[in-house]
Image: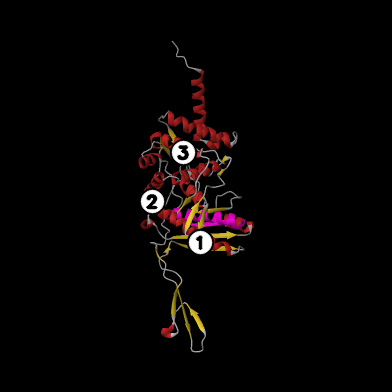
Amino acid sequence: MKPKYSLSLLLLCALLVGALAVALKPDRYRHILPDQVVHSLRTTYELLIVQFPVEEAIEAPQPELIGQTVSAPQRTFLGRGETRHIPYQRRGECIDQTLGEVAKKPTLSLFTWVDDNGVTHYSDKRAGGGEAKQIKLSTGDEMDYYLLDLKTHGVHKMFKDQLRARIKKSFLFYRSLLGQGELRKIAVNMQVFANSAHYADYRRSIQATVAADAPGFYSPSRNESVLLYLGEQQTTETAVHEAVHSITSGLIGETGPWLTEGLSEYLENLQVKMQYAEVSPSPDWRSKQGLRFSPVPLHILLNTAHQEFYGSSSKDFYGTSWAFIYFLMDDPTREQWLAQLLLQEKADRCDVTLDIAQLERVTGVPISQMQRTFNHWLRTNTLTAHRY
């Protein structure tokens, strides 16, 4: 007697086969299917495969380098049991570009004295015999967290002081998570162009594989951020975003795209308030009307390689990355989870080790439960600012 199959089962099988084909060979179908359809089928495949794991060979996603082009690596395949940790390939050589341990800045002093003619003098060096009085301009307790090399091309440097202050406060965020002993001095190299043609010429000269309309980008191999000046506020926010890439790369090493972009999106909204820093919810991703992006499931977000993250659905990946970092920092217990995740990722600077299994080990929470809590948080009408 022939077995009977329900129509729904046949349709499910057909959908799985179609989604599998697109998931494994997305580029083959982009010329006949819209990007949104390809992304939807890929997402469907990911959701189905979690519910119905099978033993098949899937193609490892190929990385896309931001700020540098690389030759296409050889194709490799992974068995289903290995896909929890997709091996993101190193974007260039694994080199520690930090500047050593963080130390206290030297005390800055000004010396003043009155000469025999009654004239008052000021100098940064002691003079005037023993009559010179020392005026301390700094306490000597300030930490020397970073070295900013800022090159501006036709741009007024008025925003430089604000940029310095926001970069400095960004280190307070990392110190609160990692501890002072885990910090290293970071070189923040940045070029800002006022002329869009000059910006485009430089982008092409270093073969940066970013969209032509991108207002800025970070090249990990050069440890350099490049920006187009679009007004003081927007340029400062973009500069902070790209500077955080330098900090994350220096302190943590290789990370998945969701982590480095989530941290940069989060700290981009940092404001200096007297002696503390405040991070508010991003208006780019959240408004009074709700979210400005379509959330990506966490099990997809954490396993997505660079090529797909920065592809046609990058807005949703960026938005979800920002939201997940804000979600973790919005609760003391979850904040400690993020701290542990960063420290574990930092332990192996040259490889991306953070995956779903590690997230579940650190938090003690299954990814399905984490997703439900995250979904509930996303529906929260009001979010509070974070202070450091």
Q: Which residue is mark 3?
A: 374
The one nearer the camera, 116 or 338, is 116
Relative to 373, 284 lies left or right: right
Q: Is residue 108 above or below residue 374?
A: below
For the C terminus, the image quarter is bottom left
Q: Position of residue 324 (x, y in %)?
A: 47, 43
Q: Is residue 325 above or below residue 31?
A: below
Which corner quadrant of the image does residue 239 belong to? bottom right
Q: Are marks 1 and 3 in contact (CB under 8 Å)?
A: no
The one nearer the camera, 361 or 305, is 361
For the N terminus, the image quarter is top left
Q: Position of residue 98 (x, y in %)?
A: 42, 59
Q: Which residue is mark 1?
A: 164
Q: Which residue is mark 2?
A: 346
Task: Report if residue 232 lies within the magenta region.
Answer: yes
Per the rendered image, the range of residues in magenta is: 221-249
Q: Is residue 131 above or below residue 375?
A: below
**Can residue 23 be spotted in the picture?**
yes
Q: Residue placed at 51% from the left, 26% from the top?
A: 15
Please, what is the dominant secondary structure of the magenta stretch?
helix
Q: Secondary structure at mark 3?
A: helix
Mark 2 or mark 3, which has the lower sequence index? 2
Instruction: Name the residue type under label 3.
Output: Phe
Q: Residue placed at 63% from the left, 56% from the top?
A: 196
Instruction: Name the residue type under label 1.
Output: Arg
The one nearer the camera, 275 or 205, is 275
Q: Are marks 2 and 3 in contact (CB under 8 Å)?
A: no
Task: Report if residue 8 lies within the magenta region.
Answer: no
The span from disc 2 to disc 3 (Cα, nearest Å) is 25 Å
Q: Nearer the viewer, mark 1 or mark 2?
A: 1
Outermost residue, bottom side: 116
